Amino acid sequence: MPRPYALIVAAVAGLLLVLSGPPPAAQAADNGTWAVFPTPPEGSDKRSREYFAHSADPGGVIEDSVTIANTSEKDLTFRVFATDAMNTPQGGAFALLPVEREPKDVGTWIELGAKDRARDATITVGAKQRVDIPFRLKVPANASPGDHVGGIVALNTKVESVRKKDKVQVGVQRSVGARMYLRVNGPAAPDLAVESVTVGRSAPLLPWTADAKATVRYVLVNRGNVRLRPTVQLSAEGLFGRDVLTQRPRALKLELLPGQRVEFTERWADAPQLDWVDLKVTAGAFDEPKVARTTAETSFVAVPWQALLGLVGLLLLVWGGRRIRRRGGLRAMVRRIRRRKSAASSADSRDTDEEWTSAAPSTLTR
């Protein structure tokens, strides 16, 4: 009997938000087979918006509509639902929660449909057709001010392929989602922190025959209530304040959402090979002057350990060889001394015998 399929969302296309410097042109949520986007104005097929961007007071209500366009040659059936957004733990890519994870924020505030409103819906979109789905976003009266980010997702109900994972058959489905940016009016409190700075090193076997390399890891945490585009600068000093690394602040190609923490990894191609290094990671926010620059640092000793251990091993071999030779020389000296003592002892024994013989009393006669 075959094992049941496990559900896995293998692709969430069009959800990555790439930011570097000024805001780029918006990207469509489209995987080439179907697309999800805010409904254009009535009578227009042109996408005037590529994502949802709204603001409201706590307790406010927003009416809007999402469009699902089927660009394929056959009918497609989708499960449509609203959910929350997140940054991936490593690298910070923008993503929407998969269908099996329950949203807790803006994804719970959206109801689909014009009359019979529901958290999710199943619809079929004909080939080369589109369907407009109205929705209502009701902001709770106690909603916290700041940015609340999520999206509306269309998950293809068809299992496109089957994979094996730990002896279990896994059905693979694809989904596409349109981003939802909601700003709840109130005080904005941007706050960014750097944590957990560590350095890993690798050096050539023979020092200075090639460059040493290092890997810098650090964590950025958005502690505020608005989304941020972080900037990062790495700098390092060696002994006596010598500059060994200087970077200009640069904008990371991502958007850090409120409450998210993301680990980043950076390569240091020409790291010191023999030094005491103090490394600093300084973070700020692009186009957000209210965010104070924050710094975290760590120190490490750059030593060519492989070469040092090899040198120690060589010295031990030399010392051991000398000790062995010295012990061999001592043994030979001891043997010579013993032979001399033995020869001297034999000579003393012969002299004693002769004296004893000469000192023997003569025979007495009457």
Image (spheres, helix red, strand yellow):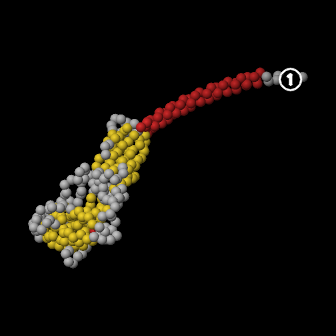
- Residue at the outermost right position: 366
Query: Relative to residue 316, is residue 21 drawn left or right?
Result: left
Instruction: Report the quarter where the N terminus lies.
Output: bottom left
The residue sitting at 38% across, 45% down in the picture is 280
Against 259, is 326 above or below? above
Q: Position of residue 131 (x, y in %)?
A: 14, 70
Q: Quadrant of the C terminus?
A: top right
Quadrant in the rendering for residue 362? top right
Image point 20% across, 77% down: which residue? 115
The residue at 43%/40% (across/down) is: 276
Vertical side of 122 occupied by 164: above or below: above
Secondary-structure class at tag 1:
loop
Q: Is 4 above or below relative to 230? A: below
**Circle 1: residue type:** Leu
How many labels sit on residues? Answer: 1
How packed is label 1: few (under 14 Cα within 10 Å), some, or many (20 or more)?
Answer: few
The correct choice, above or below, for 241 with respect to 47 in the image is: above
In this rendering, does residue 24 appear at all?
Answer: yes
Picture quadrant of residue 349: top right
Regarding residue 218, the answer to whether it shows in the image is: no
- Does residue 39 appear left or right of residue 274 in this picture? left
**Residue 125 on image: x %, y %:** 14, 70
How far from the left and from the top, in percent, is residue 38? Answer: 18, 65
33 relative position to 138: left or right: left
Residue labelled with disc 1? 364
Residue at 15% across, 61% down: 48
- Depth check: give the residue in front, 241 or 212: 241
